Image (tube, rainbow, N blue to C red):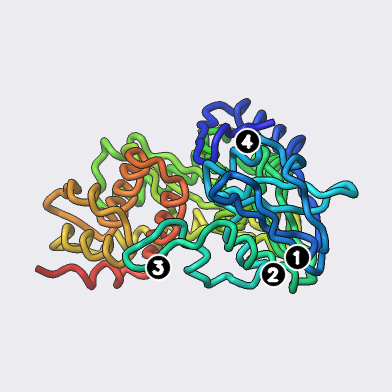
Amino acid sequence: MKYLKSDFDERNLTKREDLQDYIEFRAANDKWIHPFCNECTVSGIGIAGMVEKAVSQAAGFSIPDNDVEESQELEARLTNKLLLVFPEDFSFKAMSIRYTAFRDVLNRSGFEKSSTLEREVSKEKKGAMPPLLKGIIMSLGLSLNQEECNLLIRDEKVSAMKSAQYRIFRDKDVVEKLESYLTEEFPDFTYAGGHVNHEYLLFDYMLNATDQEESFRMMLEDLGVDADKLGTFKIGVQVSTSDVGNSSITFSPFYIMNGVKAFLAEPLKVPHLVSKDIYDIEECFPKIAAAIKESEDDIETLGNTPIHFPKKCVEGLVDELKLPKTESKDVQFDSDCTAMDVYFALFDVIQKAYANTGSLSALINNSERIAKLLKNVNRITVYDKE
């Protein structure tokens, strides 16, 4: 069964019921299996259309053509033309390798920095390696790796092939633990929507924390922020989880002002490492409120730092942080501008880019890069010149 119908499908989780449907589906249908790497091989689809076998000497098996499901061969043919063959329930199965798992397979086979294997189409004077040859080379690499791996089967494809050091966290467990905490500490919290694709699950909660919001509002009024913008001021927390993107559980406190969401602090992260467990995630929860409180000083510092050439600052930071350039060209500023206005404008840029491109991974990664400016105002002021 598939929740996402294609590799690049993205769905909105508008209501809390949508999020529940998703996490319940993943809990019921995702499958993690744990073969040894040298039990797995990669098979490439040849020019004639047959599924070719790249057989590992260590594993010593092959799969007849008629044992490969037609749907899996079709899926592979439409993407990277590669299938992973792995043991399951005392037999071997061949499944198409989703783009999210390709780099994992390269890592397990010892070719993590091979541009030749990564290249799917010929570029300039460098040709693309045929899928059959890729399969043979990657299979030889896998045959030399005796470690166990964590193989994720999701929506009828191999979505990840992680090392034995990878800790699996279920989205359902994270959501239940977080909402239990929010119920105690922010009893008026509300779900505010989310998105999911094959790289990330991202969703927001509005904390409806009257005291914290009022404290921020007073501080921003003292800094001269327009009252119309303050009328929409709200504080929340963004949650993102990923088995194949950043491979971490991330909590990012934010504020929304005039329709734009900006991080209040650098994200709190728990990586998917075997040394971590659900208790490490729970330890992050109290840090959310602490980060919101501590961020007032950082925002105040930005608000007290005058900027004379804000567009130059945006141009410089867009280049430095590798942010979208097209959307940054339309940024407008009032005559009296501060580093806080520049910081806020950068978030406006990346959210407009997300609306135009739909790249959830770019939105998440760009937000985290911008958030690092909070405690380093000099990275903004260095560009404040003609």
The amino acid type, in three-letter code, at marker 3 is Lys
Q: How far across and how far down the image is residue 259, in percent?
A: 34, 37
Viewer-side label of 3, 4 = 3
Q: How far across and how far down the image is residue 128, in percent?
A: 45, 61
Image: 210 above or below 248: above
State the residue in front, 96 or 205: 96
From the image, which quarter does the C terminus lie in?
Answer: bottom left
Q: How far across and how far down the image is residue 42, in percent?
A: 67, 57
Residue at label 1?
Answer: 56
Residue at label 2?
Answer: 140
Residue at label 3?
Answer: 375
The amino acid type, in three-letter code, at marker 1 is Ser
Q: Are marks 1 and 2 in contact (CB under 8 Å)?
A: yes
The amino acid type, in three-letter code, at marker 4 is Pro
Q: Residues within 10 Å of mark 4 (few under 14, many from 20)?
A: some
Image: 203 above or below 241: above
Q: Mark 1 or mark 4: name the one nearer the start of the chain.
A: 1
State the residue in front, 140 or 265: 140
The Cα–Cα distance between marks 3 and 4, rounded to whole angstroms, is: 30 Å
For the point 57% across and 70% down, the residue is 112
Q: Do the residues labelled 1 and 3 touch (CB within 8 Å)?
A: no
